[in-house]
Image (cartoon, rainbow, N blue to C red):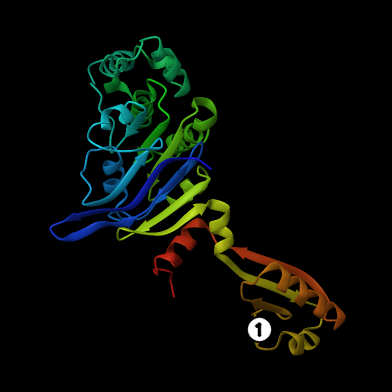
Amino acid sequence: MQFIVQTTALTKRYAGRSVVNQVSLSVPEGSVYGFIGPNGAGKSTTMKMLLGLVKPSGGEILLLGKRMEEKNRLELLRQTGSLVESPSCYGHLTGEENLQIVAELKNVPKKDIDRVLEIVELTGCRKRKVKQYSLGMRQRLGIAQALLGNPKLLILDEPTNGLDPSGIQQMRSLIREMPQRCGATVLISSHLLSEMEQMVDQVGIINHGELLFQGKLAALRQHSQGDISLRVLRPEKALPILGNLAKPDREQGTFRLPAMREELLAELVQRLAVGQAGVVELNRHTRSLEEIFLSLTGEEAK
């Protein structure tokens, strides 16, 4: 697997306090990587270090397989698009005119403007002044600016922040399709966990500057499987088999089992069948990404 972004023990300290502490990210090529954490967790600071906007206190950054240094920083950033905080636009100019300015700064052919406007679905609004754009349209214009020049990496910091449900849905669809449509790997940060769950395939969870988990979204769910609900016809025959493993639920004949490997669960169900307990229902409670995050950060409701 090739990684577009790799950091090793990346650290940033302000006045002796670490806001990013020994963070080692690995963002696979062609992925949508969700960088998740509450406000103040260190997401934006990490992204600004990746973009050369903040100087690290320690650690190493590799972008596109090359170590970021002062001599090659601009070369690497030319292949990187970004939207950090809010997009920078001139309200008295049209969307197309704003893109023309960015295209000149990036030394990108102006014909690329048509391509990025189509991707973000603003072709019909290209002649409208940006001050007449909705917040969602401005965010999409910011992404269009970032896409000029066909970057290999797209870094988006809280792109859905402040959007209404319709704007969030549009942004979610746009980002989810970015690797296929543009060939760009996406690193996106957010604290809106339920939205990220529908966009990303790779996850990094950060809190208080510490990276708590990193891997595939599917692995995170498997890593944090919830309890199992078991319902039987004859609970009196199930009790000797289950022993201290299960807790009776409110409903007669229903038991709550702790999370366990599938092999152990299959063996237990087989024993219940042999014991004639009459297994009629088995449900594994899969926790949402938000619940998993709360458990990892130690903030899960007791």
Depth check: 200 or 14 in front? 14
Image coordinates for residue 236, horizontal then vertical, percent? 78, 88
Q: Is residue 216 above or below residue 156?
A: below
Q: Secondary structure at mark 1?
A: helix
Which residue occupies the foreground of this view, 26 or 263? Answer: 26
Q: Residue at x 23, y 21 (%)?
A: 90
Residue ID at (36%, 30%): 80
Q: Position of residue 9 (x, y in %)?
A: 32, 55
Which three-letter amino acid code belongs to the residue tagged 1?
A: Leu
Drawn side of residue 118 relative to residue 232, left or right: left
Q: Between 241 and 13, which is closer to the camera in this rendering?
A: 13
Name above or below for residue 191 compared with residue 154. below
Residue found farthest to the left: 15
Q: Nearer the viewer, residue 146 or 251?
A: 146
How dense is the environment of label 1, judged by Cα within 10 Å: few (below 14), some, or many (20 and up)?
Answer: few
User: Where does label 1 land, which residue?
Assistant: 245
Give the residue drawn at x 36%, y 41%.
62
Give the answer, above or below, for where 74 lies relative to 227. Answer: above
Residue 11's image quarter?
Answer: bottom left
Q: How many marks?
A: 1
Left or right relative to 252: residue 19: left
Where does the C terminus fall, quadrant-wise?
bottom left
In the displayed structure, 151 sits above or below 284; it is above
Tell me if 58 is positioned left or right of 167 in this view.
left
Residue 94: image quadrant is: top left
Give the percent coordinates (x, y) of residue 143.
37, 28
Q: Position of residue 77 (x, y in %)?
A: 31, 30
